[in-house]
Image: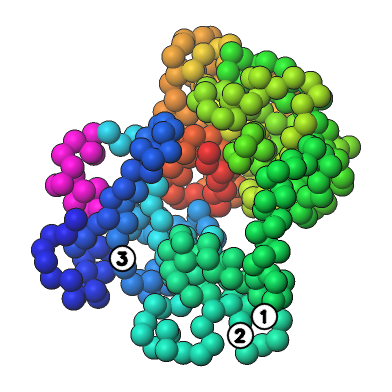
Amino acid sequence: MNRDLDHEGAQRYSDSLLEGRPHDVFVSFPSLKSGESPHTAELISFCDARAFRQWAEQPRENRGPEYSTLKERIARGMLELAESAAPGLTELVDYVETSTPLTYEHYTAHPDGAFYGPPATPQRYRSSPLGPRTAIPGLFLSGQDAGSTGIMGAMMGGLAAACQVLGPRGYSTITSAVRESSATPVPHGARTLPEGKYHAVLVSKRRLTPSVWDVTLHVDGDIDHWAPGQFARLHVGDNAWRDYSIAGLDDHRLRLLISTRTGGRGSQFIEQADTGTRTVVETPLGGFGLAGSGRRRLFIATGTGIAPMLAMFAQAPGLEHDTLLFGCRHRDEDLTSLIDSPMPGRVVRCLSREEVPDTFHGRVTDALPEVIDGSDLDPDRTDVYLCGSAAMVSDTHRFLERAGYESIHTEPY
């Protein structure tokens, strides 16, 4: 949708987007195609990557209050424009996450976040060679970089690159392998997995609450370079994978806390799986972890967001000087009381839907001002770790930034 029919003022429109008045926005609803809930909406507009270079050297998820304020302004403007064509959309929004060219550059490694690859200009398509081959022997282009943009371009670019690598009979080799694999399924555990993926067997599962399982998997093979705070990607059937923070990893035993509240594929898998069920896990993944700065630590978690922190607690020196702010709805969902694990010296439990002695009645965002007020959690000498629902992480991060905290480490789910 556009404010007018003038599409020539790219730089002017980029500036207006940063001011919170986008000229145009593309709106789509991916969840309508997937059939899964909760529903999601994507709003996309274009901007000049140079406007974000001043934050390029700042760490991801911790680029400072000015960057956060800019993202909020951009998101608000895009939503307002979308509202003009889809009245009532704003009222349906529970959570907003905003990406910038820095976000795309981080996750796709494309300079300035230009994830569509080289510009699709006439000059490019007149150039030689066009396709996977390059002037450097043994170096091939793949995906969108090989020829065409978009999902189909990326898929065909990958196929073309694989054909070139395999030689003159590359395409027929690939199609034959696909037919053979479809006709003869490989027994689970018999096929060789790529680096970073491991065969695993469910050895135990224990229901902690009506919707949370404490799960242990035995992983075949040695997992190197794991750090507390990272996560594992679990195969839950067909081509579906789900990410879960690692609560512990010792002697090939991978421990996860899995919530089944959503009722999705991951929930169904763990509810139905019996001891001995075989699957595949990819790990370790993610960059969430202890900073090792020697400063005091404030941990803030809701629900199974405490999982990566359990791994941190087991290895964090001086844990008795740290603080944990944990939130859930009811007393019987308090994982800090149900799990046998080291805990920080100070634990503040928040129950949003039940009043219980020695607990805070409300959300963690309500308790946070009281927790940090008058304590020794000085913004300049405290590392903060957030993990939980994306909305909680976003709201808490915003509050901490405004309170002067700069060392904030996050892992939303």
> Could you tell me the amino acid type at mark 2?
Thr
Residue at mark 1 to residue at mark 2: CA–CA distance: 6 Å
Comes first in the chain, label 1 or label 2: 2
Q: Position of residue 180 (x, y in %)?
A: 72, 50
The residue drawn where x is 30% and y is 36% is 93
Would you say the residues marked 1 and 2 are in contact, meaning their CB atoms lie under 8 Å apart?
yes
Q: Position of residue 380 (x, y in %)?
A: 55, 52
Q: Is residue 392 above or below residue 108?
A: above
Q: Main secondary structure of the magenta part?
A: helix
Q: Position of residue 178 (x, y in %)?
A: 67, 53
Q: In this figure, which residue is indicated by the disc labeled 3? A: 46
Q: Position of residue 4 (x, y in %)?
A: 10, 63
Q: Is residue 290 highlighted in magenta?
A: no
The residue drawn where x is 64% and y is 67% is 171
Residue 14, visible in the rendered structure: yes
> Could you tell me the amino acid type at mark 1?
Leu
Mark seen at residue 134: 2
Q: Is residue 26 above or below residue 228?
A: below
Residue at mark 3 to residue at mark 1: CA–CA distance: 32 Å
Residue at mark 2 to residue at mark 3: CA–CA distance: 30 Å
Q: In this figure, which residue is indicated by the disc labeled 1? A: 139
Q: Residues within 10 Å of mark 2 (few under 14, many from 20)?
A: some
Magenta-colored span: 73-91
Q: Secondary structure at mark 3?
A: loop
> Could you tell me the amino acid type at mark 3?
Phe
Q: Is residue 154 left or right of residue 231?
A: left
The residue drawn where x is 19% and y is 75% is 9
Q: Is residue 126 above or below residue 340?
A: below
The residue drawn where x is 52% and y is 28% is 264
Q: Nearer the viewer, residue 187 or 210?
A: 187
2 vs 3, front mark:
2
